[in-house]
Image: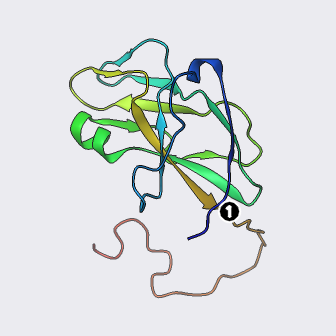
Amino acid sequence: MNEITIEVKTLSHFEGLPLPQYQTEGASGIDLLAACQEPMTLHPGERALVPTGILIAIPKHLEAQIRPRSGLAIKHGITLLNTPGTIDSDYRGEIQVILINHAKEAFTVTRGMRIAQMVIAEVVKAKLEVVDNLDGTRRGAGGFGHTGH
């Protein structure tokens, strides 16, 4: 398993919180924490931008993907909009998470709560080239549900 160092800067509203970390040895995502000063209540259907209080410097060949936590989704109907969110290597602002409440009851985000996970992934740049024809495949132009599964 490859390991890299990601530089992290913390903001004043992060003070007193532990650095985000992997929860198990086999985890692929680092759990991000809510750095809200006051509890944030999301009513059914509402969304909110939740601060994490951290900024990161990602090497040029990588990105950070922000993904939902399955426990929040199944237990409380809380997930992320814009999933996965992408943090590009040249972004240096605060990481913030767009939570949405799909449940029928209100949900309160509290300071230090694990709200999302961040996965560091390699980026492959594509060069687009216009051609007259594409290689044929068995599927061809068959769209959604085309394979019958």
Instruction: Give the residue at x 44% y 74%.
Output: 142
Using the image as rendered, state which of residue 84 and residue 12 is in the foreground.
12
The image shows residue 90, relative to residue 119, as above or below, that is above
Instruction: Give the residue at x 43% y 27%.
Output: 112
Going by the numbered disc 1, the residue's amino acid type is Val
Q: Residue 122: image x %, image y %?
A: 65, 63
Q: Residue 85: image x %, image y %?
A: 55, 44
Total marks placed:
1
Residue wearing tag 1: 123
Q: How is the image coloured?
A: rainbow
Q: For this view, does 79 lie left or right of residue 148?
A: right
Using the image as rendered, state which of residue 72 and residue 133 is in the foreground.
72
Label 1: element kind = loop
Using the image as rendered, state which of residue 86 and residue 24 is in the foreground.
24
- Give the farthest residue toward the top: 38
Q: For this view, does 57 lie left or right of residue 118?
A: right
